[in-house]
Image: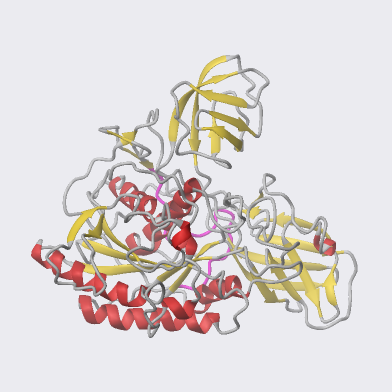
Amino acid sequence: MIVIGALAAVTCVPPAELGTPSPDGGSGTGGTTAPDAPAGGASGGNGGSALPDSGNGGQGVDVSSGSGGSREDAAPPGPRPFDWMGVIGTGQSLAVGNLGTPVNTSPNPYHNLKLSGITGPPFDPNSASLTMAPLTEPIRPLISLAAFPSAYPGNIFGETPHYFMANQISAMYAATGQGDYQTVHSIIGESGQPLSVISKGAVDMGRTGRAYAATLFEMKAIKRLAMAAGKSYGVAAIIMTHGEKDSTSDSYEDGVHKLWADYNADIKAITGQTTSIPMFLTQQHSEPFGAGSATISSAAMWRLGVKYPGDFVCVGPKYQYQYAGDGRHLTTHEYDRMGAKYGEVYFERIVRGRNWQPLQPLSAVKSGKTITVTFNVPAGPLNWDETITPPHQAALTEWGKGRGFEVSNAGGRVAIDSVAIAGATVVITLAADSQAAGWTVGYAMAQDGSGAMAGPTRGRRGQLRDSNLLVGVDAATIPCAVTSGSPMIQAQAANAFQYHGDRDVAEGTGLPADTTVAAKVSDSSMRLTAPWTGASGMAEIKLRSDHRNYCVAFEMPVAAP
């Protein structure tokens, strides 16, 4: 392991110890990997960069790439194609931080950038007001929810995933000893808008329809400023956080593919790059509403990564994240957690050039009363997450014992008797066999009730996860008052839990394995899922976001043996 000492105090960014993943990002349990994809862009350094310490009590923790175990002999990244690696962030409300307030106003600990000084419309990429600025949140001045809908540049409603995404990439890169890695982020999504409004050809209606044109404006402006600074610039990835508005659209998959193709053609014409620009996707789970309804857009996001593994990456689901009270949007902490996951997968695919794939099914075979589903496992072994409430307990109860798995045939829903993990497979035992045709197996697809209700305790969800060891850039060791036999912890310093929250992993000498935060009472007080077993007094508690990979939502046909 490579250990880098603490050199500076910056909020939420710890010193690092990097566990390098296996070359193929495969399963630690011998799970089969998904089809090979072309290597992503390589990377390299253009100057030394120290990895800062955590400013909220951090004593030095790991920033580990847990995507496939540990290999001491893994080759370091090579030279990257551009000095400034561009990242486009598009989508709808979760792309622009709805309800993600208050934002994390920490200073930029690395050299990641955003475009500043934007005026208009009209938008002039040659305007003298445009400059490059450190990537901080908020990305631009926040817009009130009362102003919805609101188009670029007034499209930011709260914390976006990009600050933590950028920091995670930079931290993991710095931990390899290769120096600095700069990403430049363009956040152009539009809250509440369908794919047609953020795609090429959308009509600018003043408050909507500006996202695609804004992307090309930023690309031209950043390209000009990069040349003036003596830097090269190209776009490395498109981050797509979308799908709610098109949750029942049968054309969504084709529409997203067209958006990717249009971006690739138009961006390459501006930057001059020749390499393909992949699109990173995360699934949505809040829409459509209604018991039994299925989310077509989420399944499409998974299928795009399977069909076009070099061009699309399904980073994973979001049901494991803690949602705001409306059941549709994330909290500030969870936007950060999602950003760090984007950063981890970007590092694997773009920096390392490895064929990282999510926790996803590879095949499903039925034999009598059993269906065996084989998975790609990014970091084995597979496990059940008992902190996620099992779905289908009050509705769709035929699947109540499925831990998120859902089986149907031509006759309708099929009752599940049990599910069990066996290496890189899950064996589903049915309550009864049937000679019916048209067997399918799904996971986290069907809604139990009415209304928006995404998250780990309600709505579309499942309990299957891997054992990824990633320790993200929010990790910190915080001195806390603890009481023997009590799950409550009190931070010694006021507001020390400001950048931590529900479902964070909690570690300490008096805590059992897999302890997490059950509830954040305040920025100084938390309740854990297990009581402190040591003596009462002061103790150091390590807190970090849970970056284990959770199974994608999917539906697929079941084959005969």
Which image quarter is the C terminus in?
bottom right
Which image quarter is the N terminus in?
top left
Q: Let me know if residue 66 appears in the view.
A: no
Chain part drawn in magenta: 18-36
Residue 469: % across, % down: 50, 45
In the rendered view, does 16 fall on the left or right side of 446? left
Residue 29 highlighted magenta (yes or no)? yes
Q: Residue at x 64, y 27 (%)?
A: 487
Identify whether 217 is placed above or below 331: below
Q: Indicate the quadrant where residue 217 lies.
A: bottom left
In the rendered view, does 117 fall on the left or right side of 480? left
Q: Residue at x 89, y 64 (%)?
A: 431
Residue 429: % across, % down: 82, 63
Identify whether 12 is placed above or below 510: below
Identify whether 350 is placed above or below 300: above
Label the magenta part by its dominant secondary structure: loop
Number of marks drawn: 0
Q: Residue at x 56, y 75 (%)?
A: 246
Residue 139 highlighted magenta (yes or no)? no
